[in-house]
Amino acid sequence: MKEKKDKNKEDYRKWKSVGYKIVFTNGCFDLLHQGHLDLLASAAKLGDRLIVGLNSDKSVKILKGENRPIEKETIRKSKLIELKYVDSVYIFDEKTPLKIIQKIKPDVLVKGGDYKKDEIVGNVEISNWGGSVEIIPLTPGHSTTEIIKKNKM
């Protein structure tokens, strides 16, 4: 059973020092939906602590276009940190979370099933320090883009 959630994002150092297995995943998490929840719950089961890299508003616009994000980064972060299986959230402005991955050096890097291992940012780095990359199958019928398209009709 996990201890009380500590929201200090630098706690990964403490967690590593006591031997916790650190899991990292990332994304925009715009309009948090069932597919996101399933991914995060599955990722959390792969270790002792789950750290989420969250694309900033600036980063989401670069990746998804000027009409995104739907929700501001502060709202997206507060939703994520309130989930029982998320222990920490880092917001990043870059297009990818590589700097965070290199800083934290997680034991497990997780992405959704729409990625192939060799396409995952941080794959090479995590392999170099003995970590693993895990791909979680997507929950069919759940994506932010689909939700937006349905609501425009």
Image (spheres, grey):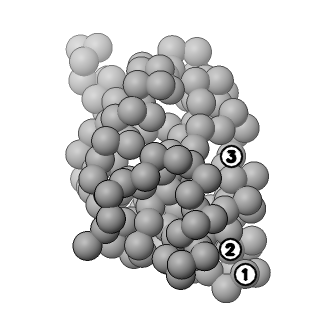
For label 2, count other residues whose C-alpha is less than 10 Å away and answer few (under 14), some (14-19) or many (20+). Answer: some
Identify the mark at residue 129; answer none if there is no mark.
1
Contact? badges 2 and 1 (CB < 8 Å): yes
Identify the mark at residue 126; answer none if there is no mark.
2
For label 3, count other residues whose C-alpha is less than 10 Å away and answer few (under 14), some (14-19) or many (20+). Answer: some
Q: Which of the two residues, 109 or 152, is positioned nearer the viewer here?
A: 109
Which structural element holds mark 3? Answer: loop
Contact? badges 1 and 3 (CB < 8 Å): no
Q: Which of the marked residues, 3 or 2, is nearer the chain's N terminus?
A: 3
Q: Amino acid at mark 2?
A: Ile
The N terminus lies in quadrant: bottom left
Q: Amino acid at mark 3?
A: Thr
User: Residue shown at 51%/14% (left/top)?
Assistant: 67
For marks 2 and 1, give the CA distance. Answer: 5 Å
The C terminus lies in quadrant: top left
Identify the mark at residue 96; answer none if there is no mark.
3
Asked if residue 114 can be seen in this view, the reply is no
For marks 3 and 2, give the CA distance. Answer: 15 Å
Which structural element holds mark 2? Answer: helix
Q: Amino acid at mark 1?
A: Trp
